[in-house]
Amino acid sequence: MIKLGIVEDHQILRTAMVNLLNDHDDFDIVVEAFNGIDLLEKINPEKLPEVILIDVEMPEMDGPTTVLKYRELYGNQSKLLGLSVHKEPRLINEMIQNGSNGFVTKSVSSEELFHAIKKVRSQGFYVSRDIAKFLKSSEQPVLQDSLLNETEEKILRLICLEKKNDEIAKELSLSRNTINTYRTRMLEKLNVKNSVGLVLYAIKSGIYWIDNE
């Protein structure tokens, strides 16, 4: 079972999510909180959740600050999945910069939510189609602009297709170490911390687009 945490300030929604996920055989809620402060007070460092769902907009300590504080305390031991009604691109941008592993909208179906949790745990990132469309159409840049060369763009497209470094290396006839170097360089160029930052940059810049299938 995947150990989960939920951070959501609306009690009715939080209770509904807890009940929904606890009824699923693959999930076990180990901590629930109404904001980032509450999460950090309740979290057990010896039994950290594998995935934590974090509302983007919360009182006292919002989603971006919660992600930042959690990463400072516990590094990358948990995957952090943002929950958003996609009203504020600035907050989503801050979530990316602070180390969030992905986003889903609160309007997604239960099946997509289950899929997102499993995906972010196994692949390290997940972006719902609604979030991708919103960020693509928003006027405010989501990520710092940076010009990637042709090879970097090819690697980035393959990352978006969830290819692992070994698979990318084979497809491009490069060594695994070379792919690792390119990935590190792209993270530095784009000023992002993980794969979801790369994927959202690719979506925003038109290098990659999530299809409608």
Image (cartoon, rainbow, N blue to C red):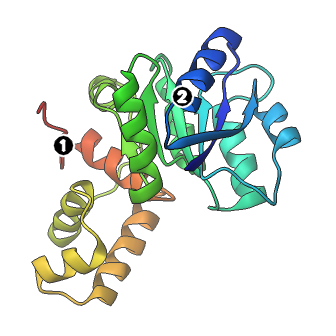
Residue 197 placement (x, y as % from top left)? 42, 51
Q: Mark on residue 32?
A: none
**Residue 174, image x and y in percent?**
18, 87
> Which residue carries the number 1 mark?
206
Choose between 82 and 154: the one closer to the eye: 82
Residue at the (81%, 57%) spot, across then down: 45
The image shows residue 11, relative to residue 198, as above or below, that is: above
**Is any part of residue 144 visible from this angle?**
no
Amino acid type at circle 1 is: Gly
What amino acid type is highlighted by mark number 2? Asp
Residue 48 sits in quarter: bottom right
Considering the numbered disc 1 on the image, is that residue within a helix, a strand or a loop? loop
Q: Residue furthest top?
A: 12
Q: Quadrant of the C terminus?
A: top left
Give the class, few, some or many, for how many residues have Cα within 10 Å of label 2's Cα (few <14, many ≥20).
few
Depth check, mark 1 against mark 2: the one in front is 2
Q: Please rate how many residues cluster around mark 1, counting C-alpha atoms within 10 Å: few if below 14, some from 14 to 19, many from 20.
A: few
Which residue is nearer to you in this view: 51 or 56? Answer: 51
Quadrant housing residue 60: top right
Q: Nearer the viewer, residue 102 or 123?
A: 123
Residue at the (38%, 49%) spot, across then down: 119
Which residue position holds label 2? 23
Residue at x 36% of width, y 39% of height: 115
In the rendered image, which quarter is residue 155 located in?
bottom left
Q: x, y percentage for residue 111?
A: 35, 29
Q: Is residue 6 above or below residue 43?
A: above
